[in-house]
Amino acid sequence: AFVLRMNADGSKPEYLTYLGGQFNGTTDPDETAPALAIDGHGHVYVAGETSSSDFKVSRWLQSDPGGLADSWLARLDLDNSKIIYSTFWAGSKKDSALALALGPGENVTVVGETSSANLPVAAATQKTVGQSNDGFVAQFCDPWPGASAGSLSFGWTQTTPLPDAQTVDVWSGCQQKFPVTEIKSDQPWLTVTADGGTLSLKLTATVAPGDLAPGQYTANVQLTIPDAYNQTLTIPVS
């Protein structure tokens, strides 16, 4: 399979990549990619079927192939030529992803066909396979942390009361909870607290200028989310 992006007037390619492995069997093609969509970050989601055990996976939910043929899902950053996320999703027989839809948030819903009795299921309305070939619906969510304020700004004049605390909502775009292992400020005059240890959460920022001389000062609040591709979220403060 491959993904191709042309320039605006269609005269030349801007991006072209293969998506596949080394399987060389009697069936052809060894990989298919019938489903594609572009999310709000400009990333490309692609899904299909592979017969290759060495199909490239990254930050996967299922690292190993399951059976004769496997469905797969990938999230690509074309501008930086990177695989953000790629996984098998399959049982012990034949599985194929046929279509996908994006949203809400960072969710992606994939539909396809399976003949595997052990395809992974969760919160299923039908938990067991019916006939030799069944449809499946699966929803995945790859966290992409964001904040309600792109930056925070405080103003203070000596002899006046300190500025009020400010709050920022931070989210992952997913319903699942993802741990935040560190929240820190890079300046001693800025204190940040959180109302929880997983996304989504609310940050409260307060300032204590102390003996700072009059002037302009900047700081950064950084959150570390290990399960996210962009593991560090930075919120500027001025």
Image: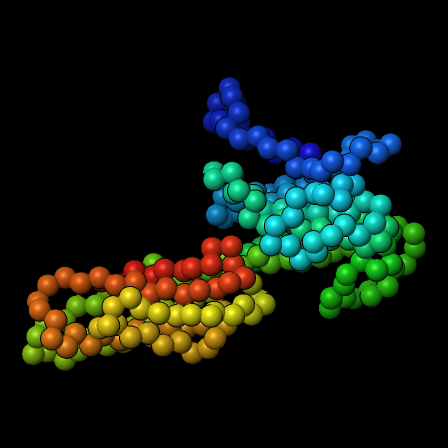
- Looking at the image, the residue that sits furthest to the right is 131
List x then y, in percent, for residue 126.
Answer: 82, 64
> Observer-nearest residue: 163 or 226?
226
Q: Residue at x 55, y 48 (%)?
A: 84
> Observer-nearest residue: 157 or 93?
93
143 on left or right of 119: left
Quadrant position of the C terminus in the picture: bottom left
13 on left or right of 65: left
> Observer-nearest residue: 199 or 62?
62
Which picture quadrant has residue 55? top right
Q: Residue at x 87, y 32 (%)?
A: 26
> Observer-nearest residue: 3 or 230?
230
Quadrant position of the N terminus in the picture: top right
Residue 165 visible, this angle? yes
Residue 38 visible, this angle? no
List x then y, in percent, for residue 56.
Answer: 66, 44
When the figure is inspected, residue 141 is found, relative to residue 72, above or below; the finding is: below
Q: Residue at x 57, y 30 (%)?
A: 16
When the figure is inspected, residue 96 is found, relative to residue 106, above or below; the finding is: above
List x then y, in percent, for residue 39.
Answer: 54, 47
Q: How is the image coloured?
A: rainbow
Q: Residue at x 92, y 52 (%)?
A: 132
177 on left or right of 232: right
